[in-house]
Amino acid sequence: MNNALPNTAVARILIVGDVMLDRYWFGEVSRISPEAPVPVVKIEKSEERPGGAANVARNCAALGAKVSLLSVVGADEAGKTLASLMQKAEIDVSLHEDAGMSTTVKLRVIGRQQQLLRIDFENTPDHEVLRAKLADFNARLAQCDVVILSDYGKGGLTHITEMIASARKAGKPVLVDPKGDDYARYAGATLLTPNRAELREVTGQWHSEAELTAKAQQLRESLDLTALLVTRSEEGMTLFTADGPCHEPAVAREVYDVSGAGDTVIATLAVMLASGLLLNQALFLANRAAGVVVGKLGTATCSLDELKQSENKAR
């Protein structure tokens, strides 16, 4: 199979979902606190990165696609920071502000290259703000090739069923990164990308490849999906379609951090499909891209150059 990279500059991706701001505080640990048996971290530097659907958008942009992002943020400093980060990445962003909510922030404290603590700040957006976002979504559909719906369970995709129906009516492929155990709301999507644990939550445990295939295919058919992609960490990833399963083994490399790898997978699939590749070709490249980002700390991206280098090594 020819896995040469297509011209991704033609790809137009519309992303809707829950955005968040990932904050990292890096420091040194040299002693235990006298107040409690916990390490004392002397903070030396900090970083801010887009998370959630914003990280998906950043991954699409890193691969050369034209990207539009719709989401909801609070009328706060974190929301403004996210908007600024998106604009710097040359992403067409529409962040609907809800004065009644706080922008989701995940603060991670890192010492000696290990995560010591994570603190989350979040609440759900207002229904009327979400309705306005739905109208914005419908207005932008005609200008995209592929839609990504990135569900992190923060309430930003309350109208996901209507979005899938609108996209399908417009003839646009819809890729969904799911959350929770109610997959009925994703019915009619083109592709779902649950990880191993998320699939177990919906289908129950399996004890063999044959049992996994049966459960995955039953779920795919019941939801009227074209495909179901299960990301399986060290076991690689498996795509289930009407033609049967197609497996890509994990790329052999030192795993540094798996956070955000799912964002990279769905972003790469979308960009490659929008660029004209077939699904199994896009799957190969998504697996290579995931192999790149797990070698980086925190939410990260795989650039087009990094993907080319990784793809060349696979030949």
Image: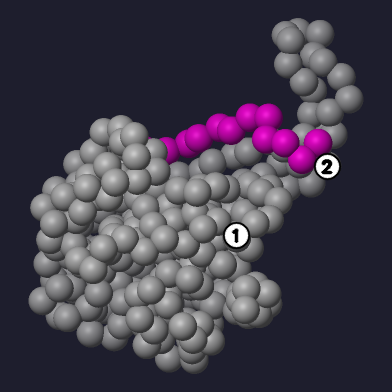
Q: Residues within 10 Å of mark 1 (few under 14, many from 20)?
A: some
Q: Position of residue 90 (x, y in %)?
A: 53, 78
Name which quarter of the figure residue 282 lies in: bottom left
Looking at the rendering, the stretch of residues picked out in magenta corresponds to 112-129
Type of amino acid at the residue the image marks with label 1 = Val
Q: Any magenta on residue 20?
A: no
| Colour option used | one colour
Tag 2, which secondary structure?
strand
Q: Count the numbered circles shown.
A: 2
- Which mark lies nearer to you, 1 or 2? 1
Work out whether residue 259 or residue 241 is closer to the camera in this orientation and state it: 241
Up-down relation of residue 145 to residue 112 (above or below): below
Image disc number at residue 251: 1
Work out whether residue 183 or residue 100 is closer to the camera in this orientation and state it: 183
Tag 1, which secondary structure?
loop
Provide the residue designation for mark 2.
Answer: 44
Name which quarter of the figure residue 315 lies in: bottom right
Type of amino acid at the residue the image marks with label 2 = Glu
Up-down relation of residue 163 to residue 27 (above or below): below
Report whether residue 56 is seen.
Answer: no
* Residue for point 48% across, 71% down: 284
Q: Position of residue 2 (x, y in %)?
A: 49, 86
Q: Position of residue 58 (x, y in %)?
A: 52, 68
* Residue for point 26% across, 63% down: 244
Tell which circle, 1 or 2, labels the residue nearer the N-terminal end. Answer: 2
Horizontally, residue 39 falls left or right of residue 310, namely right
Up-down relation of residue 134 to residue 294 (above or below): below
Report whether residue 248 is seen.
Answer: yes
